[in-house]
Image (tube, helix red, strand yellow):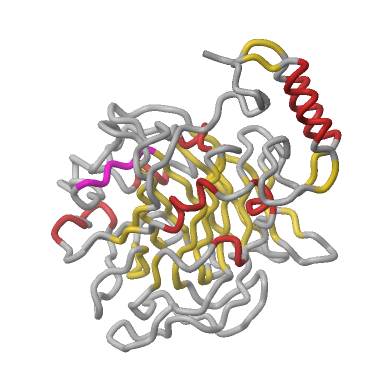
Amino acid sequence: MKNYYFAASTALVLSASTFAQIAIDGTAEAAYGPAAVVQSVGTGFGNSTDGLKGTCNGSELDGAFASLDATAGYLYLTFAGNMQSNFNKFELFIDCKAGAGQNQLRSDNVDVDFNGLNRMGADAVNAQPGLKFDAGFDADFYFTCTGGNDPYTLYANFAQVLTEGGGIGSYIGQSVTDPTTGVIRIDDVTYGMQAAIDNSNILGVDGDPAGTSTGAGVNTGIELRIPVSVLGWDGVSPIKVCAFINGGGHDYASNQFIAPLPAGYGNMAEPRLIDMSVIPGDQFFIIGGGTPPNPCPSDLDGDHFVGGSDLGGLLGGWGPCGPSCPADFDGDGAVTGSDLGKMLGDWGACPG
């Protein structure tokens, strides 16, 4: 049974100020709405019990939250739970383009995180076919992060997953801890991605895969903001998300998958031998489709040209704004100089 998450499609019509309430700090705020999916299998990678924002003694994925802001061009994701501070890997795959991507991982993708993506791909020498996703899931995008050290530091990489292999990938940096708030976050200035972690959860699933614990009620963990331009989203396809926790060498998969494995499943071990298509249910959830991001948001009057009429509309809405505020381009709840600068930068004929 597929895990559909229609609430995120609704998010496409929410105001920009709603998304301004999402801060990348490792916590799924109320603006996300309810969890898209909740974990139902106890972790085989150790139950977290120490409650610290950084260091952590277990790894679990208790659930996932998602919001898609197609107007501003960002996908927000929070994966509730914990990542043990021993450099275990958080693995995220996204299917966001029709007729493209890899249903079974190749071994000739771009080299990121010490070739971690290809470590999960096909190995002809040892007759290991490569990680295979459920039918209907063809990965187009990969993100991985890991953490450890003292003080705790988060490290992250991303890569395209192209049908024919190759593609673009990059290390996007290491975290900085805010001395006031304690937020552990990566701000990537090259691609516009953000990633944060809050390891303080001590609730959620326990360490018994055969038990009845759930991840319900947990809203802290790994949080991401990904530009849809980096995703390569085609603007209309449903966005499908598969995530799991892996060993430090991308070489030993846990039983913590989102969407969950069936009840009672233990650790999955060698990723190259995992075939999700033969596991009951779907180990991914669907956020939903929508309309393509607006290529010219500064064109307030819809004449495909940013000019004096649009400037007048912006100045007329100057100051704090309510739920309907088309000139609040940066989503901070007010029309200010930042929005004026955006409009002036777009001045002239709209793209296309």
- Residue 325 position, x and y percent, is 70, 42
Image point 42% across, 33% down: which residue?
235
Q: Is residue 53 above or below residue 351?
A: below
Quadrant location of the N terminus?
bottom left
Image point 35% across, 53% down: which residue?
286
Q: Is residue 251 magenta?
A: no
Residue 215: quadrant of the picture: bottom left
Front position in the image: 352 or 25: 352
Q: Is residue 111 visible to us here? A: no
The rendered magenta stretch, by its main secondary structure, is classed as loop
Image point 80% across, 37% down: which residue?
317
Front position in the image: 44 or 3: 3
Q: Is residue 40 visible to us here? A: yes
Left/right placement of residue 242 relative to residue 225 reads left
Image point 34% across, 77% down: which residue?
40
| Span shown in magenta | 136-140
- Residue 117 position, x and y percent, is 39, 44
Number of callouts in the render?
0
Left/right placement of residue 167 relative to residue 189 reads left
Residue 316: quadrant of the picture: top right
Q: Is residue 294 above or below residue 17?
A: above
Residue 221: quadrant of the picture: bottom right
Question: Residue at the top extreme?
Answer: 349
- Residue 95 position, x and y percent, is 35, 43
- Residue 281 position, x and y percent, is 20, 64
